[in-house]
Image (cartoon, rainbow, N blue to C red):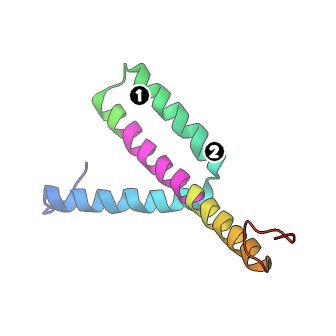
């Protein structure tokens, strides 16, 4: 963490947190689901393998959190699209779901 003159540790952490949030937002718009998932798998593999410094491990953990957020974003979007398609399909069926013409 680098802070400017006159800046408290708490202020520096808030700025760093905002920077991380900005990076996560940018990652959401640039990474596809498969890319984020594959990179997340690699991050987990590296963390599980160990042998990294505490600082590197924390950076990997933070990146993993960002990637997990990207994956959640894509999956929530897919779920919303699926729900909308199912609702549209149910609305087009005059007798409603689970009924047949024979009754």
Quarter of the image for residue 55 reads top left
* CA distance for labels 1 and 2: 18 Å
Residue plotted at (54% across, 56% down): 27
What residue sits right under mark 1 in the picture? 47
Residue plotted at (46% across, 57% down): 24
What residue sits right under mark 2 in the picture? 35
Question: Quick one: which residue is furthest to the front in this view?
Answer: 103
Range shown magenta: 59-74
Instruction: Determine the secondary structure under disc 1.
Output: helix
Residue 2 horizontal side relative to residue 60, left or right: left
- Judging depth in this view, the residue of 80 and 23 nearest the camera is 80
Q: Residues within 10 Å of mark 2 (few under 14, many from 20)?
A: some
The answer to whether mark 1 and mark 2 are in CB contact below 8 A is: no
Residue plotted at (79% across, 80% down): 94
Residue 45 in the image: above or below residue 15: above
Instruction: Determine the secondary structure under disc 2.
Output: helix
Residue plotted at (77% across, 69% down): 99
> Percent position (x, y) of residue 36?
58, 46
């Amino acid at each position: 963490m680098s802070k400017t003159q006159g800046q408290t540790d708490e202020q520096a952490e808030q700025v760093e947190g905002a920077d991380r949030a900005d990076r996560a937002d940018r990652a959401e718009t640039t990474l596809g689901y498969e890319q984020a998932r594959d990179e997340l798998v690699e991050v987990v593999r590296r963390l599980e393998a160990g042998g990294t410094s505490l600082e590197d491990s924390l950076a990997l953990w933070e990146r993993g959190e960002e990637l997990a957020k990207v994956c959640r974003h894509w999956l929530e979007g897919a779920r919303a699209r699926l729900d909308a398609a199912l609702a549209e399909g149910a609305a087009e069926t005059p007798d409603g779901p689970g009924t047949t013409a024979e009754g």
